[in-house]
Image (cartoon, rainbow, N blue to C red):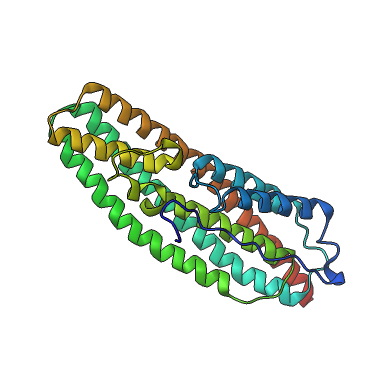
Amino acid sequence: MKSKMAVSRFHFRSISLPSRLHPINTPKTENQLQKLKSWQISNSPSQTPPITSEAIQFGLLKLAELYNSVSLLHQDGKSVEKSLESSVELLDFCNIIRELIMTIKENVQALQSALRRKGLDCSIQIDINTYFSFRKRMNKIIAKSLKKNKNFENKSGPTGVLSEVGGATLDIFKCILMFLSSKSGGWNFVFTKSVDASVISEMGSVDFALRTLLGKFKNNGAKVVDIQNLRRKLQNFEACLEEIERGLERLFRQLVRSRVALLNVLTDHLK
């Protein structure tokens, strides 16, 4: 990243379709692709705020509309085979991210439970440090997943709307992974003396509140209001994760339906 507070630009492949794919290149599909491109621009590094759960939810919604607008009529066999191969990887990738979110949510819930039980008891510091240790392990998994995403993006294949849809799906996956990453979510800001809340994502906001609480415990300045504030942030973050999780579940079902449709088209080509 060029800046710790920057969000990487997500590039969409340019659309250039041969005439034989015209039945797929419908105005509705083009419109949905343009909406996703607008979403991409709104998350560019030229803007200060990082990726938020709201932006991700909007991106998932536009992606769902894009999948619903695509037709496989008159698609050539080579493109179908390539898209069919990619569909397996997209399904696998979607599952990896879903599992990551479920694991994070479980750890957030565990921390919430500890806060309810212990309150201002100094032993809560152990639970906070346990959460941070988990986040560090998770970051390694996310880094590997981002690398996998990059390798997938670099694979060459036939151009067309199906390729565009696959590229858009990968961009959404990248966006979610960056949202879940400490490095882009606010981890790097927690050691500063003052932080503008507008430049921290929901996850980064939790990180900052946790670090602040640890500092207050160290100086014997922790108060009940600090615990209450942290609990609100954790509840908000959990709700954000649940919304993204639901969006990914819908996307997973769409990816399954898309794969079935591709298999049917390929079967027709082989007849």
Q: Position of residue 28 (x, y in %)?
A: 80, 50
Q: Please identify the quarter of the rendering in which residue 208 is found.
A: top left
Q: Position of residue 258 (x, y in %)?
A: 67, 59
Question: Image quadrant for the C terminus?
Answer: bottom right
Q: Along the horizontal axis of the image, is 82 left or right of 127? A: right
> At 52% across and 53% down in the image, what residue appears?
175
In the displayed structure, would residue 111 be above or below residue 14?
A: above
Q: Position of residue 184 (x, y in %)?
A: 42, 52
In the displayed structure, would residue 266 be above or below residue 38?
A: below
Q: Along the horizontal axis of the image, is 151 left or right of 157? A: left
Relative depth, front residue between 43 and 179: 43
Q: Please identify the quarter of the rendering in which residue 142 is found.
A: bottom left
> At 71% across and 64% down in the image, what residue appears?
162
Question: Image quadrant for the N terminus?
Answer: bottom left
> At 29% across and 57% down in the image, what residue appears?
137
How many marks on residues? 0
Q: Please identify the quarter of the rendering in which residue 207 is found.
A: top left
In the displayed structure, would residue 148 be above or below residue 114?
A: below
> At 67% across and 53% down in the image, what residue appears?
37
In the rendered image, the residue lying farthest to the front is 193
Q: Position of residue 125 (x, y in %)?
A: 17, 38
